[in-house]
Amino acid sequence: MVKNLLSINDLTKKEILDLINFSNNFIDDEGNFRKEDLFPDKTVANIFCEPSTRTKMSFAVAAGNLGCNILDFNIDSSSIQKGESIYETIDALNLMGVDLCVLRHPDSVIRELAEQLPNMVFINAGEGSISHPTQALLDMKTIINHKSNLDGLKIVIVGDLDHSRVTSSFVEGIANFDIEELVFCGHPEMCNKYMNTDFGIYEPDMEKALKDADVVMTLRIQYERFEKDLNLDLEGYKNTYQLSSEKLGFAKSDAIIMHPGPVNYIEITEAVYDSENSVIREQIANGVAIRMAVLSRFLSS
Ligand code: CP
């Protein structure tokens, strides 16, 4: 296994499945996370240069459950505000004895940092619109929990795909499996990257896209990543692209509904979020188990 987890492409299919299977060991029969004092001598720093709730807190919970010392780096009160670079910041942490950095950054800096700081282990917790490998692992785990495996499924991803690192890492991850059909759906101005690919089809008509789907992944509009004002007719957008109970009726009756969060209820109605098909809250819990597995593997290597 590679030393750092920078991209889902760093993992083979076997390593992906091994991590997902390994993550099951961290949940007991009652569904609680096991607390194991496995790494009392390891220090993990959570460095988030973009907002986060699920990823940051689940890494913190995971590291705590494994007995690690966890440092919550606060960018707003750090010396980055005094002009220090991210390299100098992590170099300082390295000199203090930090073993592993969980890094979320708006720019693609993690690969260069990993080369510059070979004694540090890096886990990518979100790289701009490019990559979010642990999200892909927890998404694949959630699907496998419900559908046994990824082979033979029709998967639909709908929403703001262009800005979605969740989509890019998920698509890279499921490329290891025999997916029956992968359909991209959403407003044409939010799906430019996915209009002409050889791994899926773009279908702007949500009714057609959802037909007989096994898995529907919904995504919020990432307003913060648009370079110019998005003059969107919100009601028109909801009519066309919001996953409502009515539109869900086009998918298979046992289709699972996913969303990486946070949910804005523009891309999905509250009724669908709360429906029996929704596994959105399970995704959050699976994030802890996957991150316990990832931290265990990468702290041991
Ligand atoms: N899914 C996800 O990355 O959520 P956060 O931004 O809350 O970490």
Image (cartoon, rainbow, N blue to C red):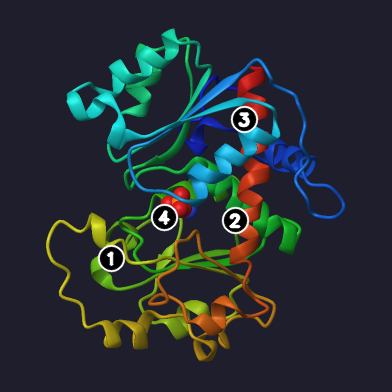
Quadrant of the rendering where the N terminus is positioned: top right
What is the distance, in whole Å, between disc 3 and disc 2 at their CAs? 17 Å
Residue at 61% from the left image edge and 41% from the top image edge:
61
Tell whether 266 sits left or right of 178: left
Residue on which the image places disc 3? 295
What is the distance, in whole Å, between disc 3 and disc 1 at their CAs? 34 Å
Pinpoint residue 196: horizontal percent, then vertical percent: 32, 60
Residue at 17% from the left image edge and 24% from the top image edge:
83
Residue on which the image places disc 1? 190
Residue on which the image places disc 2? 284
Residue on which the image places disc 4? 198
Instruction: Locate residue 235: give its quadrant.
Output: bottom left
- Kindly tell me whether residue 30 is visible in this rendering: yes
Q: Amino acid at mark 3?
A: Leu
Circle nearer the N terminus (4, 3) = 4
Q: Amino acid at mark 4?
A: Asp
What is the distance, in whole Å, between disc 2 and disc 1 at their CAs? 25 Å
Q: Residues within 10 Å of mark 1 (few under 14, many from 20)?
A: many
Q: Residues within 10 Å of mark 3 (few under 14, many from 20)?
A: many
Pinpoint residue 181: horizontal percent, then vertical percent: 55, 65
User: Are dots 4 and 2 in contact, CB under 8 Å?
Assistant: no
User: Are dots 4 and 3 in contact, CB under 8 Å?
Assistant: no
Residue furthest bottom as drawn: 246
Give the mark toward the camera: 4 or 3.
Answer: 3
